[in-house]
Image (cartoon, rainbow, N blue to C red):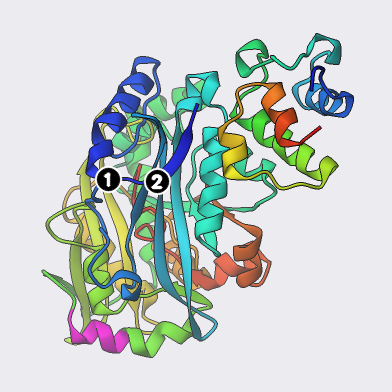
Amino acid sequence: MDQLNDTLADIFADVMDVDPDDLSLSTSPEDVEAWDSLSNVRLVMALERQFGVQFSTDDIAGWTSLGDIQASLKL
Amino acid sequence: MSLRITPYLPEHEDGVAGLNARLAARGVAWGFYRKAVPNWLPPTERGPAETVWQDYYVVTDDQACRGGFVLKPQIFRHEGADIRLTSWQGPVSEGLIDKAYVSVGMLCLREMAQRSENLFCWGGSAKLLPLVEAFGWHRADTNWQIAVVNGGRFARHARILRQRPAVAWLMDLMSRTGLASAAATAWAALRQIGCAQPGLRAVSTEALDERADALWSAVRDQYGTIAQRDAATANRLLKQDGWPDARIFNVFRDGRFIGWGALRLSQKSDDPRFGDMRVGTLLDALSEPGEERAVLSALTQSLRSQDVDLIATYMTHDVWRSGLERLGFFELKHRRAFCATPQMAQAVGGDLPGFLSRAHLTPIDADGPHGI
């Protein structure tokens, strides 16, 4: 895993209303103004719908960046 | 980061104090409970055989605490059968002030839903409601009921209604001219015409007894849904030596027991809703069928005689709301959201507004009379 998955980037950009080209594996909540508790829920719901997965508590608890989310999705 | 959700133990109290201090330093007005053992409804040795109790949970990150929530499992009577429904309170989350913890709120809500099949919240904060809706959980709004006793003080201090400058100006004018007092008195008198309830008496008691048990057995299936209110459970909910500082009354008509209720008096100070008013709260009530208004009348009379400025409550059942309305209470619409997981909504028939109109829920239900 060395670059951000396009589908993940598009979903994230749509939920957070940011440019997908500005995103990387190291993007964290501190880097994105709109990434708060509410948008985080919307992101998780959108990802679970799109990828047909159910994230575990351990998955979500360990996220500090988009790279962690991508790792949970095994993309 | 190693977030973990765990039952709140005494060894977490320092961590919770740290969380509360960080939240307060950033201007967040609320925090989590300082003590690991609930002051209200602690777990008992009866365990799951108990009818109602509270469990506290915290979110830890190594030694630090990053959040917390409360679950309150309770036996309800629903459509003639016992069912356990669980209300939640919170979550409190460090995500409010530190973006590294934006997942804490969601983790808490998911953990709650995993721990409790039928989960609901009644009276969640403005910050919680969008989270709940983002999850796709269900929501219906319920109302407050208030009766103005001292019109002048109500007009000056009812911040709950004074949020618009024009309304605040008008209420100040009514207070200065005496119109507010006159209107409150006239309204109360008008509502009493033809509604006289002779022979009623509310008698203070330390605890409910076998009369409350008999009443519970007689009425529990009259409601679509009602939280268990046998004497032991009600006495536990309305503990006399702790929060919520309730006073229990048996109500009699011509010497015959017709129901009971619980009241609370509180002198507010710079309260965001009630300013400096003296507020009487109808915490709970149960009556023989057809005696709802009589019980409410006896209880509100007891509060009026204690010089309150305002009487407030929130009840959901149509008959109790009608009784309050006949006694001169106004309804403040959409003041208290009822949220439920899809499983809970399905368990109660899928139609939350219809469920609520047939459910006798009172301020002692859910997380109790916070903020009133």
Dominant secondary-structure state across the stretch colored magenta = helix
**Residue A29, quarter of picture:** top right
Rendered location of residue B208, percent (x, y): 18, 76
User: Is A24 on the left-hand or right-hand side of B351?
Assistant: right
* Magenta stretch holds residue B71: no
Q: Which mark is residue B6?
A: 2
User: Is B159 on the left-hand or right-hand side of A66?
Assistant: left
Q: State the extent of the magenta-drawn residues as a range.
A: B209-215
Residue underneath mark 1: B9
Asked whether B336 or B75 is in front, the reply is B75
Chain letter belonging to callout 1: B
Q: Residue at x 19, y 53 (%)?
A: B245
Rendered location of residue B304, percent (x, y): 23, 55
Q: Which mark is residue B241?
A: none
The amino acid beneath tag 1 is Leu
Q: Quadrant of the C terminus of chain B?
A: top left
